[in-house]
Amino acid sequence: MPIEAEEVARAREFAGKHLMTRAHEVDLADPVITRVERIAAERDRPAVRDDRRTLSYSELALEARRLATLLERSGVEPGTVVAVGGERGVAVVAAFLAVELVGALYVPADTTWPAARVRNVLEQAGAQVLINVDDDPARSPAMVEGAAEAGVRVVPAGEAARCEPWAGAPRLESQDQPRYVLFTSGSTGRPKGAVVEHGGMINHLLAKTVDLELTGEDVVAQTAPLGFDISVWQMLCPLLIGGQVHVIGDEVGYDPVAFAAAVDRQHITVVELVPTMVRLLLDDLAGAASAGESPLAGLRWMLATGEELPTEVARRWLTAMPQARLLNAYGPTECSDDVTHHVVGASDLALLRLPIGTPVINTQLYVLRREGDGWQACGVDETGELFVGGHGVGRGYLGDPERTREAFFQDPFADTPTGRLYRTGDAVRLLPQGVLQYLGRVDRQVKIAGVRMELGEIEAVLQRHPSVGAVAVVVHHV
């Protein structure tokens, strides 16, 4: 039911008292590629690397501009949806910047998806071109097959080597220009394409630099699959401040011992993992610590996100890795990724459920509950549903006005750049300490190893089989 201003008139004053907000002046005008080229001109340095090659800031900008020329030759115009897929590496970062240069929308095509999922996403997104960053198309057959079924032209990124660098200025008309589309699970069986605007993306990237106190000396691990929203900040955030991105492939990323060795070897200072992986990492590093070794000695931050961080995992981390602060991060894809941060401290370990924290910069948070036909703001220690306003709130779901109306509303509380309020579907409580505590979902959405799933989507797909008469999907904890 829409949230209209008149419905919350009674709650406005109360909401103002309990509003969680954090204003911070930031420059949202420049695209990432402009900042990359500025750093390259001031003092060129390594920008992004993977297991095969390293690109400096100037080399990254050059590769992005060659790819931009390739995109333009492929018929890409401002507003065109461009898919990028293939193995994660430096080429994906360059491809994102190329899409940004020509004013198109980026949508990832994850190589782990089956062909049907790739086809569905590309069709819904209306993608015209897919840039394949893999040298050999045989390395991602499902992605190529799905693109073909969707009628999307596949363009090898390697062809850009024969292109002249694109000479134009980045095509950015305004802060509310759509920048990327990420698809999440949908209860009807169709994934939902969340549209994030330029200003929301940049605000979130800058929020990370502020709260993590990032500098040009930091190296951030890019570990997330391209279909995850956290992949965006991992591959772009360090580029705003002259830092480095190190892309760690799945083979290493899913092996805790190999992963820890890579973090040490590459002098990585910032890592973000789902709590399930943090637990496995602690399990496998226990032996090294008992032998007197000091794994992850250079790590400054461990970010836990994507699923609830258990108190016991936090306790183990603070004991085993006191040199690396633990940040509990929370946020929906629809709001440009994280909307809260919380640095976990010893005092938090007395709680059964850890806080998810306070707002990131330029974000407003409201805890509301149903009251009659309207909504009432909750006070301290009251449970309600979390709503998000501010710079990061996205535009809605691509080509899906009905589901957009169900989750996005005109913000009745504050005059914000987007003017929108997003209903998260998450139950939270405002603790006396002034931080939010996550309590679970108000619907049937679940998260498994950080992957957001609608049980209704799984049921809808199973019901398509002619041999299935009725189906119910539940989560079994082991």
Image (cartoon, rainbow, N blue to C red):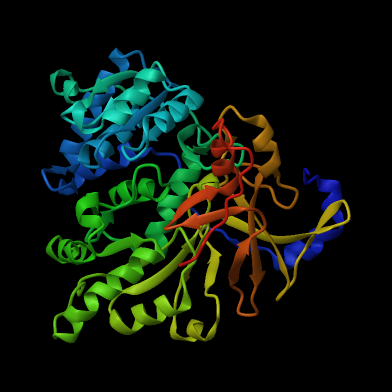
- 24 sits left or right of 93 in the view: right
* Rendered residue at 61%/61% (across/down): 21
Q: Quadrant of the N terminus?
A: top right
Residue 296 to residue 32: above or below: below
- Point out residue 360 in the picture as x, y percentages from the top left corner: 51, 60
Residue closer to the observer: 372 or 310:
310
- 262 sits left or right of 272 in the view: left
* Rendered residue at 15%/45% (across/down): 44
- Point out residue 351 in the picture as x, y percentages from the top left corner: 55, 82
Residue 260 to residue 352: above or below: above
Q: Is residue 156 visible?
A: yes
- 99 sits left or right of 445 in the view: left
- Point out residue 7 in the picture as x, y percentages from the top left corner: 85, 50
* Rendered residue at 20%/71% (across/down): 298
- Point out residue 29 in the picture as x, y percentages from the top left corner: 44, 39
* Rendered residue at 25%/32% (across/down): 140
Residue closer to the observer: 146 or 180:
146
Q: What is the quadrant of residue 328 in the picture?
A: bottom left
Q: Is residue 212 visible?
A: no
Q: What is the quadrant of residue 61 in the picture?
A: top left
